[in-house]
């Protein structure tokens, strides 16, 4: 199963120095036919200009996405919080061909 006309996600992976600080980010590639599933959106406090957004990215299985990657979709930058492996259905064995990544952004 492939979703047509989905989003294209640009994936960047940070490289770190010996102290764990991010030095550069390398463009890993673009992943097509992704879609977003919004989870929550909330302001940090009553008078804040920042909003915290949590969303789920569904992407074709086998794509190279790791925890801590930076993903840009339609000009919005997200940080990958966790990645779920794509397992076939335990009863039928059917695989939908998509994996899940939890994303977070502060805008």
Image: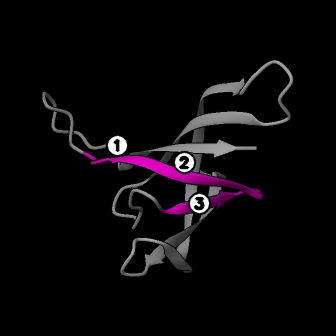
Residue beneath the point at 45% across and 78% down: 15
Task: Tell me the mark number nearer the camera, choosing from 3 and 1.
Answer: 3
Residue 70 sits inside the magenta stretch: yes
- Compared across the picture, whether 72 is left or right of 96 comes to right
Query: In the figure, residue 41 lies in which quadrant?
Result: top right
Of helix, strand and loop, which mostly describes the magenta segment?
A: strand
Badge 3 density bin: few <14, some 14–19, many ≥20, Cα 10 Å: many
The answer to which of marks 2 and 1 sits earlier in the sequence is 2
Residue hosting label 3: 71
Q: Is residue 1 shown to the viewer in this render?
A: no
Q: Position of residue 56 (x, y in %)?
A: 52, 38
The part of the chain drawn in magenta is 69-86
Closer to the camera, 88 or 39? 39
Q: Position of residue 98 (x, y in %)?
A: 39, 48
Residue beneath the point at 48% across and 72% down: 21
Instruction: Determine whether 40 is above or below 22 in the image.
Output: above
- Work out which residue is located at the far left of the displayed protein and give it: 91
Residue hosting label 2: 3
Pick the quarter of the image with the C terminus: top right
Q: Position of residue 3 (x, y in %)?
A: 54, 48
Give residue 39's mark.
Answer: none
Query: In the figure, residue 36 lies in which quadrant?
Result: top right
Closer to the camera, 65 or 41? 41
Per the model, the C-alpha gap separating discs 3 and 2 is 19 Å
Per the model, the C-alpha gap separating discs 3 and 1 is 22 Å
Residue 98 sits inside the magenta stretch: no
Residue hosting label 1: 96
Closer to the camera, 41 or 48? 48
The answer to which of marks 3 and 2 sits earlier in the sequence is 2
């Amino acid at each position: 199963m492939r979703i047509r006309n989905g989003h294209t996600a640009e994936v960047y992976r940070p490289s770190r120095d010996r102290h764990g600080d991010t030095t550069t980010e390398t463009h890993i590639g673009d992943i097509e036919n992704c879609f977003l599933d919004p989870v929550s959106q909330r302001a940090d406090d009553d008078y804040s200009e920042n909003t915290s957004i949590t969303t789920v990215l569904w992407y074709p299985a086998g794509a190279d996405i790791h925890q801590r990657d930076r993903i840009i979709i339609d000009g919005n930058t997200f940080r990958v919080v966790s990645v779920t492996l794509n397992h076939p259905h335990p009863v039928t064995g059917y695989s939908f061909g998509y994996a899940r990544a939890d994303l977070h952004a502060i805008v």
